Image (tube, coloured by chain):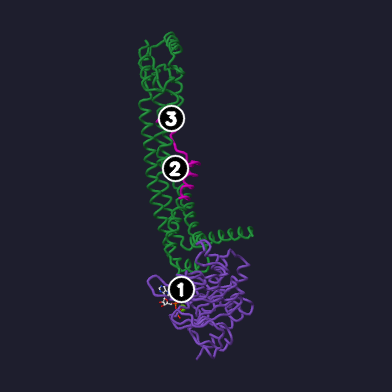
């Protein structure tokens, strides 16, 4: 008995999928259009999310590393250096510090710029223009404490400048958080629009299948049986639209990376977005499928209730 | 099998279409529902098939009260019946084969088993050679027979036909009545509504005669007494 029910159910699902695929095949153009609409709507917040996410990862990285940059006077000698290092080691507010000597910095800079045109100009500089520097992580993340520490460090003789990194990093990070919120809001609006569009598409399909629905109801079809092909239609629209969105996203990122390439080469940064972001891709597909399902579920439930059978 | 107890039906905004009707149909019976146009025959059949609910009184099918069925149970009740609708309700966007297979899909039967049953049903009504034809290309009588094939394909225990010989001339009508007799012969309960004088094929069967919504007679009648 229960095996019978299960095989009936499986048959219903198989039939519904077959039916939907046939209908989609017969209406390939309109199927493609609705999938494209879904893809574009999913893709727009996707692109911005990717950009903001990447930026915030970069800034987080920087924030972790350094809170205060301490640049020494250009003419500081070895003694001054070890003297300052001694002061830093004794300061209770400092968690960790790293020394980058002017030689190291110079070396790094030359290596980094070896690959591009800046190289020529760098080589023409006979003298090392860079100072010795300490990069400091404080124990406290409080802005006031950091400000205090900065002033303290600034006052050490032999220091050219103490730079607090938090100011702009914090500003950027709040900006990015705001950006994420805006993206979320836009995504929610687009999702709402998609619900309406998918719902409308499914409603149109229901109207063209009205006779079949009436007859099916009359001869004993359950509501879930009648709903099933339309739900699968919504799910398949979502799936195809989601996949298309990921392809679109990759194409946009590719274009973006290429145009950014020249610029970033110049600055010796490797700012490029990944073509394929697995977690974002999965989120997009899941969201698209869910929206497709929900849109058709709402439409089909209302439309079927409105169809009178006598 | 089917029991009406003081059933009254009133459509929203209409007068009483059926008035205080009581009768009993045993399993395996062949019953005719007769009466003038507008007498309430279709309404009576719809009450049996759980398509309409009585305004008052009880309709019992296989000891289940139609009025008390949960909405989720109604589809399963309807699957007990093979229904031939007065207006056929064929689907004109698909061929004969696909029209007949619909009830099987609803019952979760597909593949070769379904195809076998569809062909058997089409064969019974003499339309096997038309399985690929679209319903619109069939004659009136052929469409009636297609509707019958769809009604019997899921092997229901109760067959309900509303004017199955509607606009057919006498010889076609007799042909279709033969089909119903064949089902009656193998134990199916058959209920047929008709406003016409019954042909020679009916000799002694139950007749429910309705006049302006009132059941005038549920006796065994011969063809002769009905005509008078
Ligand atoms: N859905 C409905 N809403 C309102 N009134 C209805 C409805 N269906 C039928 N009626 C009325 O109920 C009465 C009986 O209708 P019914 O269809 O049962 O008659 P019938 O005996 O089948 O007639 P016919 O032989 O012409 O098919 C008619 O007066 C009709 O107008
Ligand atoms: Mg009628």
Q: Which residue is mark 2?
A: A254
Which callout, 3 or 1, points to the residue nearer the camera? 1
Q: Which range of residues does the magenta coloring cover?
A: A267-290
Residue A148: quadrant of the picture: top left
The 10 Å Cα crowd at callout 3, few under 14, some 14 to 19, many 20 or more, is: some
The 10 Å Cα crowd at callout 2, few under 14, some 14 to 19, many 20 or more, is: some
Q: Is residue A203 left or right of residue B70?
A: left
**How far is mark 3 from mark 1, CA to CA?**
77 Å
SS assignment at label 1: strand
Q: Is residue A39 left or right of residue B131?
A: left
- Residue A75 shows in this picture: yes
Mark 2 vs mark 3: which is more N-terminal? 3
Does A135 sit above or below residue A298? above
- Residue B150 shows in this picture: no
- Percent coordinates x, y for residue A235 in the rendering: 49, 54
The colour with which the image depicts chain B is purple
Residue A170: quadrant of the picture: top left
Q: Which mark is residue B8?
A: 1
The colour with which the image depicts chain A is green
**Is A248 covered by the magenta stretch?**
no
Q: Which mark is residue A124?
A: none
Q: Nearer the viewer, residue A296 or A81?
A: A296
Pointer 1 chain = B
The 10 Å Cα crowd at callout 1, few under 14, some 14 to 19, many 20 or more, is: many
- Percent coordinates x, y for residue B158 in the rendering: 58, 73
**Is A285 covered by the magenta stretch?**
yes
Q: Which mark is residue A60?
A: 3
């Amino acid at each position: 008995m229960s095996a019978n029910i299960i095989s009936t159910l499986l048959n219903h699902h198989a039939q519904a999928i077959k039916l939907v695929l046939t209908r989609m095949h017969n209406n390939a153009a309109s199927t493609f259009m609705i999938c494209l609409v879904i893809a574009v709507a999913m893709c727009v917040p996707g692109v911005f999310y990717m950009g903001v996410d990447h930026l915030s990862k970069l800034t987080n990285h920087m924030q972790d590393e350094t809170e205060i940059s301490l640049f020494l006077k250009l003419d500081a000698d070895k003694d001054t250096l070890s003297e300052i290092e001694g002061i830093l080691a004794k300061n209770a507010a400092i968690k960790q510090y790293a020394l980058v000597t002017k030689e190291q910095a110079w070396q790094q800079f030359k290596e980094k710029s070896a690959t591009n045109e800046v190289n020529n100009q760098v080589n023409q500089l006979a003298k090392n223009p860079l100072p010795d520097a300490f990069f400091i992580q404080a124990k406290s993340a409080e802005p006031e404490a950091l400000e205090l520490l900065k002033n303290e460090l600034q006052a050490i003789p032999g220091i050219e400048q103490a730079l607090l990194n938090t100011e702009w990093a914090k500003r950027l990070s709040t900006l990015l958080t705001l950006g994420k919120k805006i993206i979320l809001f836009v995504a929610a609006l687009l999702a709402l629009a998609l619900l309406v569009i998918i719902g409308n598409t499914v409603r149109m399909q229901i109207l063209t299948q009205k006779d079949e629905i009436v007859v099916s109801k009359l001869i004993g079809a359950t509501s879930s049986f009648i709903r099933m092909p339309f739900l699968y239609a919504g799910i398949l629209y979502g799936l195809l639209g989601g996949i298309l969105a990921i392809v679109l996203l990759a194409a946009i990122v590719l274009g973006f990376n290429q145009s950014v390439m020249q610029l970033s080469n110049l600055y010796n940064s490797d700012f490029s977005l990944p073509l394929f972001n697995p977690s974002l891709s999965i989120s997009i597909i899941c969201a698209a499928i869910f929206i497709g399902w929900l849109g058709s579920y709402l439409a089909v439930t209302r439309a079927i209730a409105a169809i009178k059978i006598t | 099998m089917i029991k009406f107890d003081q059933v009254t039906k009133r459509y929203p905004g209409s007068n009483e279409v059926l008035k205080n009707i009581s009768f009993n149909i045993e399993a395996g019976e062949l019953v005719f529902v007769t009466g003038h146009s507008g007498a309430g025959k279709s309404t009576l059949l719809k009450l049996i098939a759980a398509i309409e609910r009585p305004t008052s009184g009880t309709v019992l099918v296989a000891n289940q009260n139609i009025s008390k069925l949960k909405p989720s149970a109604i589809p399963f009740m309807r699957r007990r019946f093979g229904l031939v609708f007065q207006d056929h309700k064929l689907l004109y966007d698909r061929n004969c084969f696909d029209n007949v297979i619909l009830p099987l899909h609803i019952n979760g039967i597909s593949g070769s088993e379904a195809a076998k049953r569809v062909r058997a049903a089409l064969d019974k009504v003499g339309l096997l050679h038309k399985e690929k034809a679209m319903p619109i290309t069939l004659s009136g009588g052929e469409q009636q027979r297609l509707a019958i094939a769809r009604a019997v394909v899921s092997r229901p225990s109760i067959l309900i036909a509303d004017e199955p010989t509607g606009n057919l001339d006498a010889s076609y009508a007799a042909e279709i009545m033969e089909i119903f007799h064949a089902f009656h012969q193998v134990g199916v309960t058959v209920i047929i509504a008709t406003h016409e004088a019954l042909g020679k094929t009916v000799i002694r069967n139950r007749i429910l005669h309705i006049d302006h919504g009132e059941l005038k007679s549920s006796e065994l009648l011969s063809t002769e007494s009905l005509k008078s």
